[in-house]
Protein backbone atom coordinates (compact mmCIF):
# COMPACT_ATOMS: atom_id res chain seq x y z
CA UNK A 1 0.00 0.00 0.00
CA UNK A 2 2.73 2.50 1.02
CA UNK A 3 4.85 1.68 -2.05
CA UNK A 4 1.85 1.91 -4.35
CA UNK A 5 1.00 5.38 -3.00
CA UNK A 6 4.50 6.64 -3.80
CA UNK A 7 4.31 5.16 -7.31
CA UNK A 8 0.98 6.87 -7.88
CA UNK A 9 2.32 10.20 -6.57
CA UNK A 10 5.42 9.93 -8.79
CA UNK A 11 3.23 9.16 -11.81
CA UNK A 12 1.02 12.17 -11.11
CA UNK A 13 4.00 14.49 -10.71
CA UNK A 14 5.57 13.27 -13.93
CA UNK A 15 2.32 13.68 -15.84
CA UNK A 16 2.09 17.32 -14.68
CA UNK A 17 4.96 18.35 -16.96
CA UNK A 18 8.13 17.84 -14.95
CA UNK A 19 11.20 17.41 -17.09
CA UNK A 20 11.56 14.16 -19.01
CA UNK A 21 13.53 11.29 -17.50
CA UNK A 22 16.78 10.05 -19.02
CA UNK A 23 15.77 6.69 -20.42
CA UNK A 24 18.55 4.10 -20.20
CA UNK A 25 17.28 0.99 -21.95
CA UNK A 26 14.49 -1.07 -23.45
CA UNK A 27 14.11 -4.86 -23.47
CA UNK A 28 11.61 -7.32 -24.86
CA UNK A 29 9.55 -8.79 -22.03
CA UNK A 30 9.97 -12.32 -23.44
CA UNK A 31 13.07 -13.79 -25.09
CA UNK A 32 11.10 -15.25 -28.01
CA UNK A 33 8.66 -12.39 -28.74
CA UNK A 34 8.81 -8.78 -29.92
CA UNK A 35 5.28 -7.69 -29.02
CA UNK A 36 5.82 -6.54 -25.40
CA UNK A 37 8.60 -4.22 -24.22
CA UNK A 38 9.83 -2.81 -20.90
CA UNK A 39 11.44 0.65 -20.71
CA UNK A 40 13.98 1.54 -18.01
CA UNK A 41 15.54 4.64 -16.47
CA UNK A 42 18.81 4.97 -14.56
CA UNK A 43 18.13 6.89 -11.32
CA UNK A 44 20.69 9.52 -10.41
CA UNK A 45 23.39 8.49 -7.98
CA UNK A 46 22.79 9.70 -4.44
CA UNK A 47 25.67 11.50 -2.74
CA UNK A 48 27.71 9.13 -0.60
CA UNK A 49 26.84 5.93 -2.50
CA UNK A 50 29.68 3.86 -3.96
CA UNK A 51 27.74 2.29 -6.83
CA UNK A 52 25.02 3.71 -9.05
CA UNK A 53 21.49 2.46 -8.29
CA UNK A 54 19.99 -0.28 -10.46
CA UNK A 55 17.83 0.59 -13.41
CA UNK A 56 14.14 1.03 -12.64
CA UNK A 57 11.15 0.06 -14.75
CA UNK A 58 9.68 3.28 -16.15
CA UNK A 59 7.14 2.05 -18.68
CA UNK A 60 5.94 -0.53 -21.15
CA UNK A 61 4.93 -0.80 -24.77
CA UNK A 62 2.85 -3.62 -26.26
CA UNK A 63 0.77 -4.56 -29.26
CA UNK A 64 -2.87 -3.59 -28.80
CA UNK A 65 -4.38 -6.76 -30.28
CA UNK A 66 -1.97 -9.11 -28.50
CA UNK A 67 -4.39 -11.97 -27.88
CA UNK A 68 -6.61 -11.49 -30.93
CA UNK A 69 -4.22 -11.25 -33.88
CA UNK A 70 -0.72 -10.08 -34.55
CA UNK A 71 -1.57 -6.66 -35.95
CA UNK A 72 1.59 -4.51 -35.79
CA UNK A 73 -0.27 -1.29 -36.68
CA UNK A 74 -1.57 -0.42 -33.17
CA UNK A 75 0.29 -0.27 -29.84
CA UNK A 76 -0.51 0.77 -26.26
CA UNK A 77 1.98 2.32 -23.86
CA UNK A 78 2.49 3.56 -20.35
CA UNK A 79 5.51 5.74 -19.61
CA UNK A 80 6.14 7.52 -16.33
CA UNK A 81 2.49 7.33 -15.37
CA UNK A 82 1.22 8.57 -18.76
CA UNK A 83 -0.73 6.27 -21.05
CA UNK A 84 -1.59 6.39 -24.72
CA UNK A 85 -1.48 4.74 -28.13
CA UNK A 86 0.77 4.54 -31.17
CA UNK A 87 -0.96 3.83 -34.49
CA UNK A 88 -0.19 3.82 -38.17
CA UNK A 89 -2.05 6.70 -39.82
CA UNK A 90 -3.20 4.24 -42.47
CA UNK A 91 -3.32 0.48 -41.85
CA UNK A 92 -1.32 -0.42 -44.97
CA UNK A 93 1.36 2.31 -44.68
CA UNK A 94 4.12 1.77 -42.06
CA UNK A 95 5.87 5.01 -43.09
CA UNK A 96 3.56 7.26 -41.02
CA UNK A 97 2.73 6.87 -37.32
CA UNK A 98 1.00 8.90 -34.65
CA UNK A 99 1.60 8.71 -30.89
CA UNK A 100 -1.22 10.12 -28.73
CA UNK A 101 -1.21 10.39 -24.95
CA UNK A 102 -4.57 10.24 -23.19
CA UNK A 103 -3.91 13.76 -21.88
CA UNK A 104 -3.71 15.22 -25.39
CA UNK A 105 -0.07 15.26 -26.52
CA UNK A 106 0.48 14.20 -30.15
CA UNK A 107 3.76 13.14 -31.78
CA UNK A 108 3.94 12.31 -35.49
CA UNK A 109 6.57 10.11 -37.12
CA UNK A 110 7.20 10.00 -40.88
CA UNK A 111 9.93 8.60 -43.06
CA UNK A 112 12.12 11.36 -44.45
CA UNK A 113 12.16 9.70 -47.87
CA UNK A 114 9.60 7.46 -49.55
CA UNK A 115 10.46 3.79 -49.11
CA UNK A 116 13.46 4.50 -46.81
CA UNK A 117 12.83 3.32 -43.23
CA UNK A 118 16.32 4.31 -42.08
CA UNK A 119 15.57 8.03 -41.57
CA UNK A 120 12.57 9.59 -39.82
CA UNK A 121 11.18 13.03 -38.93
CA UNK A 122 9.64 13.06 -35.45
CA UNK A 123 7.69 16.12 -34.27
CA UNK A 124 5.24 17.32 -31.63
CA UNK A 125 4.76 20.60 -33.59
CA UNK A 126 7.11 22.50 -31.30
CA UNK A 127 10.18 20.23 -31.50
CA UNK A 128 11.27 18.37 -34.64
CA UNK A 129 14.02 15.74 -34.61
CA UNK A 130 15.70 13.76 -37.39
CA UNK A 131 16.25 10.14 -36.34
CA UNK A 132 18.60 7.97 -38.43
CA UNK A 133 19.87 4.43 -38.53
CA UNK A 134 23.65 4.26 -38.66
CA UNK A 135 23.52 1.51 -41.31
CA UNK A 136 21.27 1.10 -44.33
CA UNK A 137 21.20 -2.71 -44.28
CA UNK A 138 20.73 -3.39 -40.54
CA UNK A 139 19.01 -1.43 -37.80
CA UNK A 140 21.29 -2.09 -34.78
CA UNK A 141 22.14 1.58 -34.08
CA UNK A 142 19.99 4.72 -34.24
CA UNK A 143 20.87 8.32 -33.49
CA UNK A 144 19.50 11.84 -33.03
CA UNK A 145 22.30 14.39 -33.18
CA UNK A 146 20.76 17.83 -32.83
CA UNK A 147 22.90 20.90 -32.08
CA UNK A 148 20.02 22.57 -30.21
CA UNK A 149 18.39 19.61 -28.42
CA UNK A 150 21.24 17.17 -27.75
CA UNK A 151 21.90 13.53 -28.56
CA UNK A 152 19.86 10.31 -28.31
CA UNK A 153 21.77 7.14 -29.19
CA UNK A 154 20.16 3.69 -29.05
CA UNK A 155 21.98 0.46 -29.88
CA UNK A 156 21.64 -3.29 -29.35
CA UNK A 157 23.39 -4.81 -26.34
CA UNK A 158 24.46 -7.73 -28.55
CA UNK A 159 25.14 -7.37 -32.26
CA UNK A 160 22.12 -8.26 -34.43
CA UNK A 161 20.00 -9.22 -31.39
CA UNK A 162 17.06 -6.78 -31.21
CA UNK A 163 15.77 -7.97 -27.80
CA UNK A 164 17.84 -5.62 -25.58
CA UNK A 165 18.81 -2.01 -26.28
CA UNK A 166 21.01 0.46 -24.41
CA UNK A 167 20.16 4.15 -24.62
CA UNK A 168 22.39 7.18 -24.17
CA UNK A 169 19.76 9.86 -23.60
CA UNK A 170 21.38 13.29 -23.62
CA UNK A 171 18.40 15.22 -24.98
CA UNK A 172 17.48 18.43 -23.17
CA UNK A 173 14.27 19.10 -21.24
CA UNK A 174 12.48 20.52 -24.29
CA UNK A 175 12.16 16.95 -25.62
CA UNK A 176 9.22 15.29 -23.89
CA UNK A 177 8.90 11.67 -22.77
CA UNK A 178 6.40 10.97 -25.59
CA UNK A 179 9.00 12.23 -28.11
CA UNK A 180 11.60 9.92 -26.56
CA UNK A 181 9.12 7.05 -26.69
CA UNK A 182 8.51 7.74 -30.38
CA UNK A 183 12.26 7.31 -31.02
CA UNK A 184 12.30 4.05 -29.05
CA UNK A 185 9.21 2.79 -30.86
CA UNK A 186 10.67 3.48 -34.32
CA UNK A 187 13.81 1.59 -33.34
CA UNK A 188 12.16 -1.55 -32.05
CA UNK A 189 9.46 -1.57 -34.72
CA UNK A 190 11.96 -1.37 -37.57
CA UNK A 191 14.50 -3.79 -36.01
CA UNK A 192 12.10 -6.51 -34.81
CA UNK A 193 11.26 -9.57 -36.88
CA UNK A 194 7.51 -9.61 -37.48
CA UNK A 195 6.72 -13.32 -37.54
Image: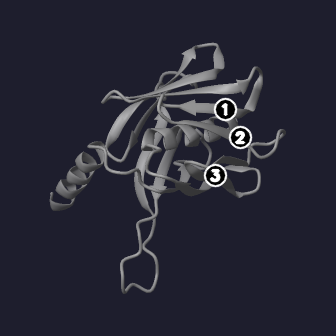
First along the sequence among labels 1 and 3:
1
Mark pair 1, 2: CA separation: 6 Å
Image coloring type: one colour
- Between the residue at mark 2 and the residue at mark 3, the CA separation in whole angstroms equals 10 Å
Residue 33 position, x and y percent, is 60, 41
Q: Nearer the viewer, mark 2 or mark 3?
A: 2
Circle 3 — which element?
Answer: strand
* Farthest-out residue, right: 137
Which residue occupies the foreground of this view, 67 or 77? 77
Pointer 1: what residue?
A: 120
Residue bearing mark 2: 132
Look at the numbered disc 1 and give the secondary structure of its residue.
strand
- Looking at the image, residue 138 lies above or below residue 95: below
Residue in the image at 60% along x and 50% along y: 31
Instruction: Tell which circle, 1 or 2, labels the residue nearer the N-terminal end.
Output: 1
Pick the front one: 106 or 117: 106
Q: Nearer the viewer, residue 189 or 181?
A: 181
**Quadrant of the image containing the C terminus:** top right
Q: Residue at x 63, y 31 (%)?
A: 121
- Residue underneath mark 3: 154
Residue 177, image x and y in percent?
43, 44
Mark 2 / mark 3, whichever is N-terminal: 2
Rendered view: 108 above or below 169: above
Task: Estimate the x, y position of residue 181 in percent, counting from the top left.
Answer: 50, 41
Q: Circle 2 — which element?
A: strand
Q: Are marks 1 and 2 in contact (CB under 8 Å)?
A: yes
Give the total number of marks visible in the rendering: 3
Image quadrant for the N terminus?
bottom left
Instruction: Please name the residue shown 77% across and 22% down the image.
Output: 115
Amino acid sequence: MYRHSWSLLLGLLLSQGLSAQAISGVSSRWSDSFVEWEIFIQPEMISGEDEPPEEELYGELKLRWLNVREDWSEWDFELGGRRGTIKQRWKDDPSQWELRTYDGEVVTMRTAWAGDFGEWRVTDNSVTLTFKSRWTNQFDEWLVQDTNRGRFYIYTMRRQDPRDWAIEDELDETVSDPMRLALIFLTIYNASPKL
